[in-house]
Amino acid sequence: MFDSFFARTEFAPWTSELRSATVRRSDPKRHGDLAGWQTIVEQLPNITPSECHLDRDTVTFGLASDASAEQLQLLHRGLFALKPWRKGPYQLFDTFIDTEWRSDWKWQRVQPHIQPLNDHRIIDVGCGNGYHCWRMLGDGAKYVLGIDPSMRFVVQHSAIQRYANDPRFDLLPLGIEDMPNTMACFDSVFSMGVLYHRRNPINHLFELKSLMTPDGQLILETLIVDDAEDGVLRPHDRYAMMRNVWSVMTPAHILSLLEQAGFRDAACVDQTVTTTDEQRRTEWMQFHSLAEFLDPDDPSKTIEGYPAPKRGLFIARLR
Ligand SMILES: Nc1ncnc2c1ncn2[C@@H]1O[C@H](C[S@+](CC[C@H]([NH3+])C(=O)[O-])CC(=O)[O-])[C@@H](O)[C@H]1O
């Protein structure tokens, strides 16, 4: 499943460390459902897409006319069985995957503020099933490595790669903590929606820094709050029903952490409140979504009484 990454010579110095972590993370004993998901992917029909579009809001592989009615039905059934699909949207032949998130909206906020990605080698930390990685390739990136510890998302990616068959994109089942700290070879380092999941935020910034080339750019996107004591809101238990949110910081606090971690020219270039149009329940993600995580009497608050989710986008460099 991960052979294409391990065949790349430019990562040879780190291959053995990354291979051990990949084997450990994808151990079927840790994931009761993994074998079943892999069988679903193996049983997807063989169809060759006549065209692919990575530069569209809906990342698209193939046309309905590329396959028989029976193949289209098998494809739809297989992809649907891999739900919940959180990040997208995607179109595979005649199947439209209407994901929980309009991830294209985030990309529209990011794209105008970053250095062109032409010929960049990129890492996307916490990439989910890889929606934004496809968009990076659509914007001219040379190669994208996505990492995400969730095996379900890795398997969803392998279903898409079955049709995309694109050697410029690998997704490994890794957390940022699995990455070697000497792998400074990425021109753009993306960390979107991960910082608040890390117990030690400045440590996360150092981890990201260690992956960057000296001229590289950091694109950091995370939950923010307008005000908090000492700049940090630490949810007591859950935040918008999420268990693993350790801290939500003010933009000023995040900028100061970036400076402490040795980044230059750090700027907060966008702040956007997440709406129930951007994150919502769909046929492809049938669990509760943002509408159920907000106070029904006051949608400016989460159900726990904290400020409702707002996201900040930060750009920084090393020199
Ligand atoms: N230690 C970790 N290391 C790496 N990834 C992690 C870790 N812990 C959790 N994740 C992964 O980080 C992702 C966070 S979602 C953002 C997805 C995409 N980036 C987006 O911007 O839409 C949050 C959101 O919904 O915004 C999930 O896929 C986790 O599995």
Image: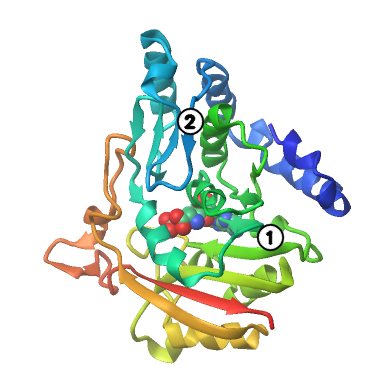
Give percent across and percent down for residue 93. Answer: 40, 25
Give percent across and percent down for residue 282. Answer: 27, 40
Rendered residue at 36%/10% (across/down): 69
How far apart marks 1 and 2 lie (CA) works out to 37 Å
| SS assignment at label 1 | helix
Work out whether mark 1 precedes mark 2 in sequence or the reverse, and give the earlier one: 2
- Mark 1 burial class by Cα count in 10 Å: few <14, some 14-19, many 20+: few
Q: Where, by quadrant of the figure, is residue 233 drawn? A: bottom left
**Which residue is the site of mark 2?**
51
Q: Where, by quadrant of the figure, is residue 71 drawn? A: top left
Amino acid type, label 2: Glu
Q: Which mark is residue 16?
A: none
Q: Where, by quadrant of the figure, is residue 150 drawn? A: top right
Amino acid type, label 1: Glu
Give percent across and percent down for residue 266. Answer: 55, 83
Quarter of the image with the N terminus in it: top right
- Could you tell whether 208 is left or right of 87 in the image? right
Position of residue 70 relative to residue 237, above or below, is above
Rendered residue at 61%/59% (across/down): 118
Rendered residue at 27%/34% (across/down): 283
Number of numbered labels in the structure image: 2
Position of residue 48 relative to residue 253, above or below, is above
| SS assignment at label 2 | loop
Q: Which mark is residue 177?
A: 1
Question: Could one spot residue 233 in this view of the protein?
Answer: no
Q: Nearer the viewer, residue 72 or 211?
A: 72
Q: Nearer the viewer, residue 93 or 2?
A: 93
**Mark 1 touches mark 2? (CB < 8 Å):** no
Q: Is mark 1 within 8 Å of ligand 1?
A: yes
- Could you tell whether 119 is left or right of 159 in the image? right
